Amino acid sequence: MRKNITLDLALPIAVALGLSGCGQSDSQASGTEPSEVAPTQVDATGLSLDHAWVKAADDGMTAVFGELHNSTDRDINLVEAKYSNAEMVQLHETTEDGSGGMSMQEKKGGFVIPAGKSLSLKPGGDHIMIMGLKKAIRPGEQITVELVTADDQTTEVTAVAKEYSGAQEDYAPGEADGADDGDHGEH
Ligand SMILES: [Cu+2]
């Protein structure tokens, strides 16, 4: 249950992902795909969420990020996530809204993690959206989220809460809220 992600020295890169504010696709991951990386604790499903973290929040919405890793030889389709202290959890993708902003929406069909590969969940990209928090998530706190695959396998993952000021994409497409976070200077 308690997965100690800090011991995973074999994956030094993923830590910095998404923490640099406007992380718009300038991360080529610079060829860092070592073939002999040991996955952090994998259970029977072969699915793990490495370097998992959740944005600390008092109420409302927040999101879980990390590296979804599939250590099996077949694709895994993640269709649902559950968190007990929230009204709803959805699998979201983020898209550009065509006018320089970003918006997020439920990803139809969920996330597919190809056999032996990883899928990054990061601010500005795919993420696990938690809505209607019933209880604050404080920095440093660990929360447990259940991941459910299309073939009804469940994996429990632990995410540690961090303060993070990004990941403020509009929820509904086309809903300009005028938040000026200064990330995208033009226009
Ligand atoms: Cu979202």
Image (cartoon, grey):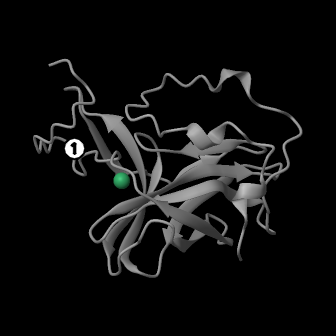
Q: Quadrant of residue 21?
A: top left
Residue 77 higher or lower than 24, as above or below: below
Q: Quadrant of residue 36?
A: top right
User: What kind of element bears circle 1?
Assistant: loop
| Residue 172 image offset from top left, x and y in percent | 22, 50
Label 1, ligand 1: CB separation under 8 Å: no
Residue 48 higher or lower than 123, as above or below: below
| Residue 135 image offset from top left, x and y in percent | 35, 80
Looking at numbered disc 1 in the image, what kind of residue is underneath it? Pro
| Residue 101 image offset from top left, x and y in percent | 23, 33
Residue beneath the point at 36% across and 61% down = 62
61 left or right of 42 in image: left
Query: Could you say which is closer to the camera, residue 63 or residue 160?
Result: 160
Q: Quadrant of residue 152?
A: bottom right
Query: Could you say which is closer to the camera, residue 3 or residue 91?
Result: 3
Q: Which quarter of the rendering shows the N terminus?
A: bottom right
- Residue 83 at least partly seen: yes
Residue beneath the point at 45% across and 34% down = 20
Residue 60 higher or lower than 99, as above or below: below
Residue beneath the point at 55% across and 38% down = 17
Residue 63 higher or lower than 13, as above or below: below
Q: Residues within 10 Å of mark 1 (few under 14, many from 20)?
A: some
